[in-house]
Amino acid sequence: MSLNFERSLDYLKMLLIVGFLILVGQKFGYGIAIIPALPGMLIVILISFLALTVKDSFPKLQFPAFAWASLTALILSMPFMPTAELFLKYTNEVNFLGTTTPILAFAGISVGNKIDKLKKLSWKVFIVAIAVFIGTYFGSAIVAQIVLKLQGII
């Protein structure tokens, strides 16, 4: 187990910036006040920081940081846990869709930095992308059709 303090500090800086962007995005996009959402965002940042630190501290464990964060949040929010009520009270103030904008921006930057690798994959990526888009579209349409039929809306 090794802990790189400089890298951990970089993680913390990045998470604080993303957290701030999420709070501002929520304010303008969804009208959610920043102050009530701040404790929930700090909890999300703390869990994310711990997940990244654990992943870096145990490099031989092939378990992604996202999985560590999800597992931690799941455990903290389980109904029988003493942390559940407080955890959910604060994190429910953070709008999930508000978190997607900075995440997708970073994903776009990440892909943009690897454009040469994507070019080497050639036309096969296009075929896979089209198949995924079509599958997602029809899958969503089928689920919507079933739900709307069950509710008697159509």
Image: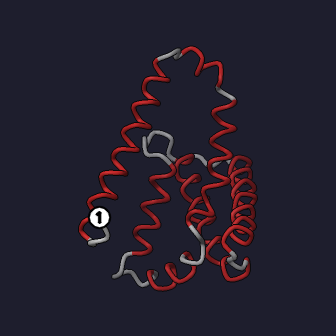
Where, quadrant-wise, is the C terminus in this rendering? bottom left
Residue 14, image x, y percentages: 72, 53
Q: Secondary structure at mark 1?
A: helix
| Residue 35: quadrant of the picture | bottom right
Residue 11, image x, y percentages: 69, 52
Residue 29, image x, y percentages: 69, 67
Residue farthest to the front? 154
Q: Look at the picture and state if 144 lies above or below 60.
A: below
Depth check: give the residue in front, 85 or 8. Answer: 85
Q: Residue at x 25, y 65 (%)?
A: 149
Q: Look at the picture and state if 42 lies above or below 89.
A: above
Q: Residue at x 42, y 61 (%)?
A: 71
Query: In the drawing, does residue 126 fall left or right of residue 2?
Result: left
| Residue 109: quadrant of the picture | top right
Report the label total. Answer: 1
Q: Which residue is mark 1?
A: 147
Depth check: give the residue in front, 87 or 49. Answer: 87
Label 1: few (<14), some (14–19) or many (≥20) C-alpha neighbours in 10 Å: few
Way the structure is coloured: secondary structure
Residue 61, image x, y percentages: 43, 43
Query: In the drawing, does residue 110 fall left or right of residue 6?
Result: left
Amino acid beneath label 1: Val
Q: Residue at x 53, y 53 (%)?
A: 54
Q: Residue at x 46, y 18 (%)?
A: 124
Residue farthest to the left? 150
Q: Look at the picture and state if 67 lies above or below 87.
A: above
Depth check: give the residue in front, 43 or 90. Answer: 90
Query: In the drawing, does residue 113 fall left or right of residue 91?
Result: right
